[in-house]
C-alpha cells in the first residue's frame, strides 16, 4: 500500500465515491439555497437557520456511523464478517433512537429552536416552516447514514454515492415544482424546499434499507440479526463511540454557537455567511472524503496487523500529500468566489462581505487539509479515538467561541468574526504534527 502508485490509486478509489456521495448529499441542501435564493435575503436567512440545525444533527448522529466504520474496518482487516454484522445491528438501533429524538424536538418546537439561533423576528418567522418540515426528515437521514457506513466499512464506497445521486435528482425536481409552483404544483416557497427535502430523505432511507437487507452479499445483514447483538461488540461501540459522539457534540455546539453569533447580524450579512458556509461545506466534503478514505486504509492496516514501519511510511506519505491538496483547494476558493456569489440575488453590500469571508476561507483551508485528515484519518482511525475529542473540546471552547464572542462585542467587521470562527483550522496543525509523528495512536481495537 505504501508504494507511491498503490497509495494514490487506493486513496482515490475510495475517496472519489465517498466525496461524490458527500457532495451529492450536500447538493440537496445547496439546491434549497440556490432555488430559495431567488426569493431574496430573508428567505436565504430562513434556510440558513434550518440548515444549521441539520448540520448539528449530522454532527451528532454521524458519530455512530464514524465509530462503526472505525471498528468494522479493523474487523474487515481480519475478515471477521460476523462481528461487522453485529456491530451494524447495534449501530442501527442507536441511530434510530437518536434520529427519533431529534425529529420530535425539531418538529415540535421549531420556533423555540429558531429563536435560540437568531434574535430577528423576521428571520425566525421565515425559518419555522422550513425547520418543521426538515425536522421530520432527521430520523430517516440518521438511519440511512448508518446503513451507508456499514457498506463503507467493507470498502463498498460506491453504494452511498449511487443512493445520493438518486436522492439529488429527486430533490431538485421536487424543489423546482414545489418552490416555484411548476407542472401543476402549488408555489410553496420556502415550505416547498422543506417538503422536497423530507420526501427525498424518506426515499433515500427506503433504498438504503432495501439494498442492505435484501441485496448486499458482503455483510449479508438480515432483520433477524437486529436481535442478535454481541455484548462485547456493544460495549466496544459504546466505549469507543462515546468520545466520537462527544467530539461530534462539541462540533454541534460549535455549529450552534456559529449560527447564534451569525444570527445577530442583519439579514444581508447572514446571507453572506450562508454563501460562505456553502463553499466551506463544499471544500469540507472534498477534504472529508479524502480523510474517510485515509481512515479506511489506516484501519485496515492496523486491523490486519501490519508492521509499525509500514504504518509509519503510510503516515509520512500522507503528511506530504495533503498540504498540497490544501493549497490547491484554497486557490480554487479564491478564484471561484465571484462565480459562486453570482448565483445569488443579494445586495451589493452582502456580495462584498461574502468575498471577504471567502478570502479568509481560502487561507484557512490549507490548515484544514493537513490537520483534518491527519487527526481523523490517521490518529482516530488508527485507534486513539479519545485524543481528537479532547483536542476539539479545547479549541472550540477555549479558542474559537470566546474569540468570536469578543469580536462580536467589539463590533469587529464580519470577516474578522469569521476568522475567529475558523482560526482553529490553522492552530490545530501545530498539535497534529507532534501527535501524528509520535505514533502512539497505533492501537488494535478488535477482539484479538
Image (tube, helix red, strand yellow):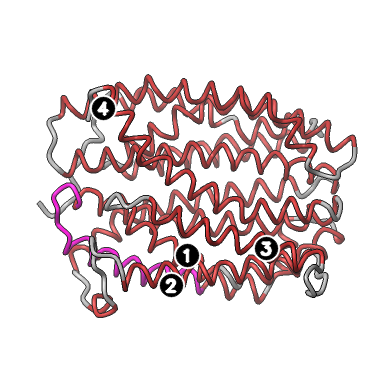
Towards the viewer: 161 or 348: 161
Judged from this view, the residue extending furthest toward the left is 448
How much space separates mark 3 and mark 2, taking CA atoms?
A: 28 Å
- Mark in the foreground, 3 or 2: 3
Tell whether label 4 touches label 2 (CB within 8 Å).
no
Point out residue 42 in the picture as x, y percentages from the top left corner: 85, 54
Q: Are marks 2 and 1 in contact (CB under 8 Å)?
A: yes
Residue at 78%, 46% in the rendered image: 270
Question: What residue is pinned by disc 3?
Answer: 173
The disc placed on residue 96 is 2
Quarter of the figure with residue 172: bottom right
Residue at image location 40% in from the left, 38% down from the top: 291
The residue pinned by badge 1 equals 142
- Residue 52 location in percent, x, y? 64, 54
Q: Which residues are magenta?
A: 76-100
| x and y percentages locating residue 28 in the rendered image | 61, 56
Amino acid at each position: 500500500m505504501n508504494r507511491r502508485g498503490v497509495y494514490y490509486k487506493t486513496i482515490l478509489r475510495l475517496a472519489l465515491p465517498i466525496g461524490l456521495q458527500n457532495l451529492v448529499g450536500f447538493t440537496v441542501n445547496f439546491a434549497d439555497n440556490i432555488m430559495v435564493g431567488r426569493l431574496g435575503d430573508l428567505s436565504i436567512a430562513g434556510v440558513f437557520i434550518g440548515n444549521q440545525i441539520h448540520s448539528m444533527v449530522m454532527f451528532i448522529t454521524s458519530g455512530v456511523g464514524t465509530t462503526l466504520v472505525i471498528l468494522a474496518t479493523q474487523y474487515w482487516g481480519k475478515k471477521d464478517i460476523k462481528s461487522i454484522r453485529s456491530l451494524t445491528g447495534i449501530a442501527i438501533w442507536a441511530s434510530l433512537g437518536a434520529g427519533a429524538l431529534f425529529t420530535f424536538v425539531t418538529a415540535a418546537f421549531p420556533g423555540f429552536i429558531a429563536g435560540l439561533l437568531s434574535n430577528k423576528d423576521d428571520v425566525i418567522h421565515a425559518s419555522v416552516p422550513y425547520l418543521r418540515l426538515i425536522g421530520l426528515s432527521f430520523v430517516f437521514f440518521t438511519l440511512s447514514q448508518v446503513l451507508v457506513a456499514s457498506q463503507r466499512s467493507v470498502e463498498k464506497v460506491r453504494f452511498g454515492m449511487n443512493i445520493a445521486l438518486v436522492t439529488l435528482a429527486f430533490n431538485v425536481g421536487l424543489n423546482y415544482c414545489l418552490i416555484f409552483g411548476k407542472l401543476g404544483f402549488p408555489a410553496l416557497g420556502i415550505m416547498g424546499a422543506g417538503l422536497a427535502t423530507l420526501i427525498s430523505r424518506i426515499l433515500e432511507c427506503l433504498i438504503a434499507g432495501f439494498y442492505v437487507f435484501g441485496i448486499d452479499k458482503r455483510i449479508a445483514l438480515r432483520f433477524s440479526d437486529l436481535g442478535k447483538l454481541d455484548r462485547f461488540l456493544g460495549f466496544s461501540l459504546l466505549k469507543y463511540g462515546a468520545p466520537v459522539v462527544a467530539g461530534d457534540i462539541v462540533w454541534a455546539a460549535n455549529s450552534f454557537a456559529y449560527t447564534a453569533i451569525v444570527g445577530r447580524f442583519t439579514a444581508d450579512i447572514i446571507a453572506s455567511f450562508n454563501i460562505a458556509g456553502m463553499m466551506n461545506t463544499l471544500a469540507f466534503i472534498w477534504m472529508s472524503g479524502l480523510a474517510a478514505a485515509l481512515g479506511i486504509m489506516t484501519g485496515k492496516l492496523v486491523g490486519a496487523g501490519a508492521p509499525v514501519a509500514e504504518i509509519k511510511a503510510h503516515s509520512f506519505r500522507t503528511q506530504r500529500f495533503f498540504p498540497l491538496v490544501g493549497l490547491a483547494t484554497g486557490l480554487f476558493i479564491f478564484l471561484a468566489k465571484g462565480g459562486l456569489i453570482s448565483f445569488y440575488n443579494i445586495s451589493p453590500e452582502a456580495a462584498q462581505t461574502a468575498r471577504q469571508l471567502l478570502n479568509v476561507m481560502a487561507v484557512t483551508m490549507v490548515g484544514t487539509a493537513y490537520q483534518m485528515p491527519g487527526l481523523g484519518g490517521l490518529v482516530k482511525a488508527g485507534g486513539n479515538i479519545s485524543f481528537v475529542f479532547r483536542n476539539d473540546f479545547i479549541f472550540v471552547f477555549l479558542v474559537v467561541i470566546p474569540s468570536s464572542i469578543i469580536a462580536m462585542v467589539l463590533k469587529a467587521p464580519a470577516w474578522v468574526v469569521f476568522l475567529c470562527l475558523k482560526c482553529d483550522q490553522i492552530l490545530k496543525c501545530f498539535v497534529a504534527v507532534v501527535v501524528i509523528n509520535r505514533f502512539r495512536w497505533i492501537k488494535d481495537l478488535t477482539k484479538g
